[in-house]
Amino acid sequence: MSTRLSVAVIGAGYWGPNLARNFRASPDWHLAVICDLDAERAQRVADSVGGVPVSTSLDDVLADPSIDAVAVATPARTHHPIVLAALKAGKHVIVEKPLADERERGAEMVAEARARGLVLMADHTYCYTPAVLKIRELIADGFLGDILFVDSVRINLGLIQPDVDVFWDLAPHDLSIMDFILPGGLNPETVAAHGADPLGTGKSCIGYLAMPLAGGAIAHVHVNWLSPTKIRQMVIGGTKRTLVWDDLNPQQRLSVYDRGVDLSLQSKDTAADPRAANISYRLGDTWSPALPEREALAGVAVEFAAAIREHREPRTSGGSGLRVLSVLEAAAGSLQNLGAPIRIDVTETNAEVEDVKA
Amino acid sequence: MSTRLSVAVIGAGYWGPNLARNFRASPDWHLAVICDLDAERAQRVADSVGGVPVSTSLDDVLADPSIDAVAVATPARTHHPIVLAALKAGKHVIVEKPLADERERGAEMVAEARARGLVLMADHTYCYTPAVLKIRELIADGFLGDILFVDSVRINLGLIQPDVDVFWDLAPHDLSIMDFILPGGLNPETVAAHGADPLGTGKSCIGYLAMPLAGGAIAHVHVNWLSPTKIRQMVIGGTKRTLVWDDLNPQQRLSVYDRGVDLSLQSKDTAADPRAANISYRLGDTWSPALPEREALAGVAVEFAAAIREHREPRTSGGSGLRVLSVLEAAAGSLQNLGAPIRIDVTETNAEVEDVKA
Amino acid sequence: MSTRLSVAVIGAGYWGPNLARNFRASPDWHLAVICDLDAERAQRVADSVGGVPVSTSLDDVLADPSIDAVAVATPARTHHPIVLAALKAGKHVIVEKPLADERERGAEMVAEARARGLVLMADHTYCYTPAVLKIRELIADGFLGDILFVDSVRINLGLIQPDVDVFWDLAPHDLSIMDFILPGGLNPETVAAHGADPLGTGKSCIGYLAMPLAGGAIAHVHVNWLSPTKIRQMVIGGTKRTLVWDDLNPQQRLSVYDRGVDLSLQSKDTAADPRAANISYRLGDTWSPALPEREALAGVAVEFAAAIREHREPRTSGGSGLRVLSVLEAAAGSLQNLGAPIRIDVTETNAEVEDVKA
Amino acid sequence: MSTRLSVAVIGAGYWGPNLARNFRASPDWHLAVICDLDAERAQRVADSVGGVPVSTSLDDVLADPSIDAVAVATPARTHHPIVLAALKAGKHVIVEKPLADERERGAEMVAEARARGLVLMADHTYCYTPAVLKIRELIADGFLGDILFVDSVRINLGLIQPDVDVFWDLAPHDLSIMDFILPGGLNPETVAAHGADPLGTGKSCIGYLAMPLAGGAIAHVHVNWLSPTKIRQMVIGGTKRTLVWDDLNPQQRLSVYDRGVDLSLQSKDTAADPRAANISYRLGDTWSPALPEREALAGVAVEFAAAIREHREPRTSGGSGLRVLSVLEAAAGSLQNLGAPIRIDVTETNAEVEDVKA
């Protein structure tokens, strides 16, 4: 690789500076411009990374033929028009989570990118942490066996958001991680969401998502803004081993337990009656793999560049962002139906999944 | 109190010896006889508590006018006939959990006891641990404020039971505790149950129960036989404080956090639009009350005697056992409906609740 | 092995019942008699294990030719006369810790046993727990490399003993374990003890023992009766790996860290100046071996029988009990000298060590 | 307060940028100049705080009459000449830990500052963390009662320093904190140091410091560069309560235990024989005070300005830095004497202590 790709960061709010800093530091990228309607805000970000041009015109940025890609870090409701405009201008796009504020808009973005042969990447930053990369690798290598359940808890005393409920605020992390680590992506047929708003804030502050998976497995997410203690834990049970990821324990973030239940069917007769099957219990060792220290966003920048150069879907593709949106939208439907399970709309989603994971 | 009450222990299997030992050690009780169809098994229990008469005839025991009460520790499917017989013989009854194997049978038992003015007590042993007694007291005293949520996790690598699923095996603990500590008992209008049997054992090994409570609150239970790590934790969020009970941390079983979210509506206008309300955050001290060391079953024996002597419902009444059954039965219905929320049948339950908690 | 060995338990106080129960349950042993000056106390223990003869005469017991061995669980100051009498009567002996109340008496006991070719075993029960057995095995197999340091902390709100200080009460556990797991036994040249009695109870309630080991290594023990929290932790640092034993964490009692510092001397020049040496850091995986569930005292009974049958020193020999006494006695001397390091008297000790560990 | 004090930061290495940033952000201070022999390095620090003048001449800086104070963040061996020069130029001085590389030099610095009526402050940053400030307050308020023991553990896989051993690298933190929180400062009569260098690096990598305190109490420090796990814990036992500070547990950094041992002497007779005294045990509640989020160095800047304006000793005075040096120097002496306790030279120290704490 001899030449750097050129990128514009759109949006100089909360997340933009992090993107700018990482693109600036990346050998793959040339950070061309910081674009924000608020010139002063753009300038502050530009200064913080050592003097980069700024612009207040998205049109100018998109019209610049020297720019290969844009990184969109604007409010979610603006993702759809900005990303579509960028794609139509021939730019590769990475977009902050959530991909869009509605599933259908996300689907349109994914279709547009595919039609144009451009990379559309979801900035699911968490997926590029050393812990999640290791989990994905262990599952892909068959180290856990077939996945039996994924249980994720993400609770703490959180800021009650003015515009979104606890599902849209916190669950995208869990869902995008599940999509990243599960061999077939996150593809539940239905979602049941149970929320509570006991303080009367107008939106759920406590939430549970139950998602049956293929083969009798289940994924579950617990998010909560009202917990006085902070927990960030995901348990991934497999037929061979079970992994516990405790993100708040830097001394042992990942623990892989060789403990579990084995069920061996011995003949046709027992197969006919599972209760007659032989159940045995494993109580083996625990292993905690060492993890490198690495900033996740640096990995995001590397992957975005690689996908462009290799003309392939990025590991966290627009399709993965769309699957997350599909679950969130079905969850919202379930909430309105008092927790009834809702089928997930997969019209656009599955096609994409096949592309990505094949 | 001058004279002891006389009790027979029916069933010398797993739980019977514990009941026998505690009745034997209690100053309130005279342990009269151990009754089991298996004479040898009965004798072993009798020997272990220092020589008590044994019997293999339930009829003989019930016909003995010197016996005031029976403690039933036989398999769940036999609770109904044995308890009814005992009540009809004029005996007070304490019965191991679950109260019965079907809600309707439990209701019949409760009605029979009430009609005869006899005590029917559910042996919800966990409720008499120092930790749960303290939680009940703190809530009753208003120390936590109004309850916003109760989240209970009870997971470990558990023995897969041949006859019951993980809900019926583990959740009775969580449900009976919730019934015990919540001011109005556990009275969700609906229950949604999500189970998974990824090993194909023929019954759920992983389970989630979501139960909306009055006033927008929610109760949730996570039970799991396939977890390599053991967790016994209940978080009880209140408007004033939040309590975390970690039963596996003997050095700090209960932690009460003066942390939370306050929502103050300032005028009619903001009341109309909750989003305009004032939200503030408390980050106060944590407090962990000292707990006495005390065996829970000793407290069960004390309470059973006191209820008989004071002609009152015990703290864990037949009605509370019935409420637990109602939730379990609705959960089973929800499971069959793929997680759809099911209304709880309260025909017999509520009347009882009023009695007990009034 | 066709016939059982016959054992008498001497002393029916705190520890005697545990010995009686384990000898009774062991296929290696015939529990012949419980001996105590207090006939009633002896009878209670005899009853609790299902009816064993009792005696109030030590002489009678020792005169009985059918008895092969005695287990002494009497107060420490009586160990010396009882054990000597038993050895002189030709009995093998196991004796509760500490071996004796003075090092010289312990040495006399060890010499007597050796002269007569009898087994004298120290009941260092902790050494037969699955955790300590595993640690010993890992060190013996070279898995940790050369030992660099052993740091043991044993603190909690403890009962202040009327007759012994915190060193004699708690440190025997740490010292006997160190003696058991270190390849050459516990053989510091000097001991420095720092104690404090800030409440004025007349003896140390807080204690620290520093013991330089061969090759620049160090062993250290912290014992404390005044700590509100309970800690039972030993860290064993090796050139290859470091092991942490947290006895209060049943879910992960042992953790083996492949982390550490490597020092590679590259030439004569750097060897001359260690500061020029190459230092590198390993940050590898953590591994927690599964441990079986097994009662330690059952292992004690097995080892005592095996040592007798195989005419060999037991794993926790009288010599190991003597090494523990040597350290305790030197520690007492250091305390009287305000913490000055005291040389350990090894006159009788080393000979024994060579026997045992050769 | 209307005008800002003017400060020069001397030394633009590891710690200088932190000092510069905090003085720059403080309303009490005007950051006048960054001074370093390496102009480029000085410029980088100046740029990072938004453009401050730089200088490569200490003489010029000290000759500038507009500068009120200097903050010295140069290597320890240069503290003595730089600080003396600054004091002679009439500047107030704050100096990074350790105060000097030898106790005697530190004493000269303290004497010089006192003679000139200038503030000499030790930058014991840890003392200004919310946790340590709270501990000091609780002890000063008598909440813990009289102090019985202080036990500090500071271990992790640390970088082996080329020039100092583990005592000089890590223990200054523990010692300066003890000096800060103990009502009379840290004034042990003797110090015993036990070190080990099992890798042959030429200096201690593992260290223990035992320091008897007045009234039978004891302070102890364990520092270790070879531990695979990281522990930062201090236990402070008092007659009324005991405090545990676990700096790596952000959810509960401080825990105050109302647990302990009470010793009540009931009469002259029992006073004569402490063993006859009445010992009782408290098992009360645990309390964890909420701590504000605050950067410690900001508090350092505030305190330095206040001490100058109020013509008083700062909370972490030169005298406290000197007491830390006295212990370290005595510890070095103890190490050379194989762990023999060494008396602390207090010729200059105590006078200062009286000033500061009176």
Image (cartoon, coloured by chain):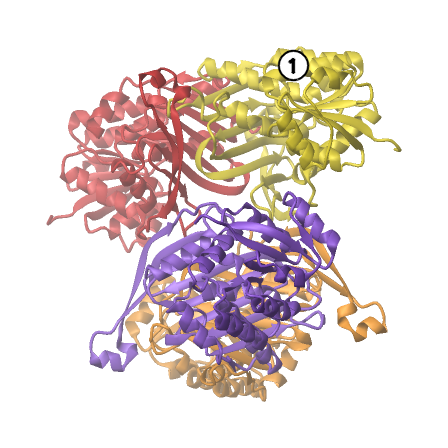
Chain colours: A yellow, B red, C orange, D purple
User: Is residue B333 shown above or below D140?
Assistant: above
Query: Would you say residue B352 is visible in this rendering?
Result: yes
Drawn side of residue A206 relative to residue A145, left or right: left
| Quarter assignment of residue B330 | top left
Quarter the C terminus of chain A occupies:
top right
Residue A173 is situated, as x and y percent measured from the top left of the image, at 59, 29
The quadrant where residue A218 appears? top right
From the viewer's side, name the closer residue of C253 and A172: A172
Q: Where is residue A123 in the image (x, y as percent from the top left)?
A: 67, 27
Amino acid at dot 1: His
Residue C107 point in image, percent of width and height: 53, 86
> In the rendered image, which quarter contains the N terminus of chain A?
top right
Q: Which residue lies furthest to the right in this view?
A: A2
Categorize mark 1 by other alpha carbons within 10 Å: few (<14), some (14-19), many (20+): many
Residue B50 lies, with reference to residue A181, above or below; the image says below
Labels in figure, total: 1
State the residue lying farthest toward the left.
Answer: B2
Q: Where is residue A313 in the image (x, y as percent from the top left)?
A: 77, 23
Q: Label 1, on which residue?
A: A80
- The one nearer the camera, D329 or B72, is D329
Q: Which residue is drawn at 17% across and 24% down?
A: B115
Q: Residue B202: in sight, yes or no?
A: no
Q: In which quarter of the image is residue C271?
A: bottom right
The chain identifier of the residue carrying mark 1 reads A
Above or below A318: residue B55: below
Element on which disc 1 rests:
helix
Instruction: Please state which of residues D159 and B9 is positioned toward the viewer in this rendering.
Output: D159
Could you say which is closer to the camera, residue D239 or residue B126? Answer: D239
Furthest residue toward front: D65
Q: Which residue shows up at 66% across the image and 32% down it? A: A45
